[in-house]
């Protein structure tokens, strides 16, 4: 049994004992691990401490029962592991800024899902100090391989350099693409970069921040997968959101070759929960494209955006509404339109009319994709006694999933 499977057994034990006192020692034993390893695994896989995870899960379950209004508050408190009704009211007020009665009448739901992901890599959250550095820009006509070319140029310019090296993409200029390399600051290095292929050398001050970090092999596919995991699966469930300050990568060298990369994502603790509410939405018309394969969502979205860019650019809005439906390897993406255009027969696009109905609406500030948010909404619908409809996921300034009439358990 691998580490992730053992951790899920510990989480299952916690979920089964949310109503009462939870022994973390027994939770660790359920996962065939030590208490200290459980602490580390919980932070790695969920972005929460064990106690914070339990607190949020208990509150999420209690709030769903408060919304149902079928039981007295005292009974809900004891059923969800709180010592008293007063303790439950205190936690509800702290998390939602509402009393339980106000929450019951409000259309916003605060939800924290049970952990059910399959972790793909270890993530640690630490406060790190990045030393004073010298940031430079490397320009090249083609984006493919620009990182490798920049590293080669740095090695030729500074043979034998043993300091830390950081990198990230930069803004292109005049048809050339940019990659920024950053090295530990040394006054003499300024002269080395002068007149070289590296430009715009700028000293960056020392900075101390909290980062979510993961280590990955120096392979493009694995690096992309790791960033997708950080932004999508890990960040959406963690107690953190992305902080100001750009992401970057640190190169770990073995000899003269890059062996691994450490990915740095600046984060801060979230001030509140993501909100879910139920709303009635009217009819909607979408221009859609369907594709299949590994990059189905990206290809389908690109086909719609490309067509609208030429024929109806006004439909592409920053606060627009988008259609996403994923079935197996296939994906259909669309953009909402106000009126139906006449489409050429061979354009590969279709008009789709979505009928009115009740929707669960998720408002979240974290980065993710349709698949991740869809799973989150589905878990909320199940946990709160709704029936999931057959409709798609819609993406807006908020996220929505179609649902049918509520049936209480």
Image: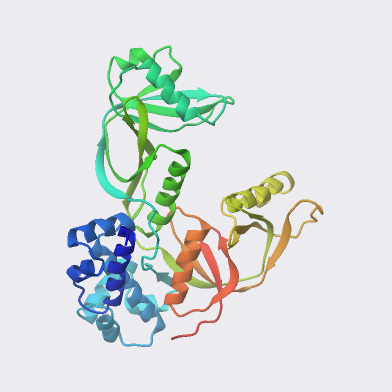
Q: Is 66 located above or below residue 168 in the figure?
A: below
Q: Residue furthest front?
A: 1
Foreground pick, 337 / 54: 54
Q: What quarter of the picture does the N terminus occupy?
A: bottom left
Who's the residue at 38% across and 16% down the image? 157
Who's the residue at 28% across and 65% down the image? 53
The colour scheme used here is rainbow
Question: Picture coordinates of residue 23 (x, y %)?
Answer: 18, 72
Residue 239 visible in image? no
Q: What quarter of the picture does the C terminus occupy?
A: bottom left
Q: Quadrant of residue 41?
A: bottom left
Q: Is 345 located above or below residue 130 in the figure?
A: below
Foreground pick, 6 / 263: 6
Question: Picture coordinates of residue 396 (x, y %)?
Answer: 55, 58
Foreground pick, 248 / 339: 248
Foreground pick, 171 / 252: 252
Q: Is 185 located above or below residue 223 in the figure?
A: above
Who's the residue at 79% across and 54% down the image? 343
Q: Is 18 located above or below residue 116 in the figure?
A: below
Question: Picture coordinates of residue 271 (x, y %)?
Answer: 33, 58
Total numbered badges shown on the rendered structure = 0
Decide if residue 183 is on the left or right side of residue 286.
left
Who's the residue at 44% across and 43% down the image? 222
Question: Picture coordinates of residue 86 (x, y %)?
Answer: 22, 78
Residue 254 visible in image? yes
Decide if residue 391 is on the left or right side of residue 75.
right
């Amino acid at each position: 049994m691998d580490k992730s499977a053992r951790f899920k057994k510990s989480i299952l034990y916690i979920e089964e004992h949310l109503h009462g006192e939870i022994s973390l020692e027994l939770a660790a034993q359920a996962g065939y691990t030590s208490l200290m390893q459980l602490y580390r695994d919980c932070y790695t896989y969920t972005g929460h401490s064990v106690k914070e995870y339990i607190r949020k899960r208990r509150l999420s379950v209690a709030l769903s029962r408060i919304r149902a209004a079928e039981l007295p508050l005292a009974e809900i408190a004891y059923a969800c592991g709180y010592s008293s009704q007063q303790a439950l009211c205190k936690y509800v007020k702290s998390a939602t800024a509402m009393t339980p009665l106000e929450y019951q009448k409000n259309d916003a739901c605060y939800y924290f899902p049970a952990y059910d992901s399959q972790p793909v890599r270890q993530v640690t959250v630490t406060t790190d100090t990045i030393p004073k550095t010298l940031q430079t820009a490397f320009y090249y006509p083609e984006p493919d391989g620009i990182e490798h070319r920049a590293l080669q140029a740095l090695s030729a310019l500074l043979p034998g350099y043993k300091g830390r090296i950081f990198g990230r993409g930069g803004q292109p200029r005049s048809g050339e693409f940019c990659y920024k390399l950053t090295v530990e600051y040394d006054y003499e290095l300024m002269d080395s970069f002068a007149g070289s292929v590296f430009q715009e050398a700028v000293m960056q001050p020392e900075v101390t921040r909290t980062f979510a970090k993961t280590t990955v092999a120096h392979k493009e596919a694995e690096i992309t997968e790791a960033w997708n995991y950080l932004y999508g699966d890990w960040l959406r469930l963690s107690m953190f959101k992305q902080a100001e300050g750009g992401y970057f990568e640190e190169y770990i060298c073995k000899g003269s070759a890059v062996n691994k990369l450490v990915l740095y994502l600046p984060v801060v603790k979230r001030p509140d929960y993501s909100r879910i509410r139920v709303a009635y939405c009217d009819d909607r018309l979408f221009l859609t494209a369907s594709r299949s394969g590994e990059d189905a969502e990206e290809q389908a979205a690109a086909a719609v955006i490309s067509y609208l860019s030429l024929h109806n650019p006004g439909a592409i809005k920053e606060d627009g509404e988008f259609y996403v439906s994923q079935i197996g390897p296939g994906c259909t993406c669309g953009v909402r339109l106000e009126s139906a255009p006449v489409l050429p027969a061979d354009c590969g696009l279709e008009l789709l009319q979505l009928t009115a109905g009740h929707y669960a609406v998720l408002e979240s500030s974290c980065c993710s994709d349709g698949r991740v948010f869809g799973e989150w909404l589905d878990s909320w619908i199940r946990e709160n006694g709704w029936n999931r409809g057959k409709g798609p996921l819609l993406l807006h300034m908020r996220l929505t999933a179609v649902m049918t009439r509520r049936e209480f358990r």
